[in-house]
Image: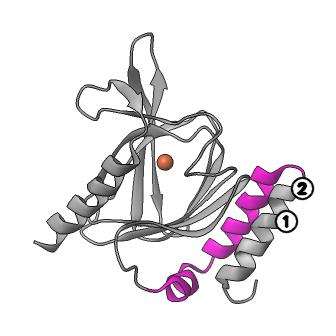
Amino acid sequence: MARFEIEQLIEACRSAVAGTDAERAVRELVTEACADPAAMATAFGEPEKCGPRTLFRAPDLTVLDFSWAPWMCFKPHNHNMWSVVGIYAGREDNVFWRRTESTIEAAGARSLGTGDVTVLGKDIIHSVVNPLGKLTRAIHVYGGDFFAPERPRSEWDPETLAERPWDMEHTQRMFAEAEARARQ
Ligand SMILES: [Fe+2]
């Protein structure tokens, strides 16, 4: 891709998930795109609101343009499908968690800056912080339907770390509240 085109990336991801080793192929596509983060920022433009914007959704592929509100902390959750994350503006600090007998414990961390790309395995549990006083922008590609996963997704209460079913309404509220706080 000489110049970043959203439609071209989506088409290439659709071809990738139809082939073998989709994760690796999608990682290469996102890496290629994130080599020019300024072009991605231009192509995506300013978001209307914080949160995920769905660019493509199918049973085997979801492509989201993600906008993290300034200083937003996002609860631990899993995806139950592989994903590739590419940052094209700002920074995303990830904490990775592992299950214990009764709950989860922090097991590692990775800070992703502009241009960084990472693959998250299907069983990963992570929480995300935007450590900056401005939006962090990222493209997230999932190897399934993010909004209707085959295996139901979990989230963990940020204070007690108790597991509970993924709550999309609560998630939307978190984004709206973080956005409102940042505007104050
Ligand atoms: Fe996630």
Identify the residue at horizontal 64%, vertical 52% (top origin).
145
Instruction: Count numbered badges in the picture.
Output: 2
Which span is picked out in magenta? 19-45
Does any portion of residue 67 appear in the rendered image? yes
Q: Residue at x 65, y 80 (%)?
A: 6
Label 1, secondary structure: give it. helix
Q: Residue 32: within the magenta?
A: yes
Estimate the x, y position of residue 163 in percent, counting from the top left. Answer: 38, 25
Residue for point 26% across, 66% down: 70
Q: Which residue is mark 2?
A: 19
182 or 167, nearer to the observer: 167
Q: Is residue 184 magenta?
A: no
The answer to whether 23 is drawn above or below residue 106 in the figure is: below
Q: Which residue is mark 1?
A: 15
Q: Is residue 81 above or below residue 23?
A: above
Q: Residue furthest left?
A: 184
Q: Quadrant of the N terminus?
A: bottom right
Q: Are marks 1 and 2 in contact (CB under 8 Å)?
A: yes
Compared with 98, 13 (above or below) is below
Left or right, 90 with respect to 16, comes to: left
Which residue is situated farthest in the top direction here?
101
Indicate the secondary structure of the residue bearing disc 2.
loop
Indicate the position of residue 46 as horizontal and vertical percent values.
40, 84
> Label 1 crowding class (10 Å Cα cut-off): few <14, some 14-19, many 20+?
some
Tell me the quarter of the picture where residue 58 sits: bottom right
Q: Amino acid at mark 2?
A: Gly
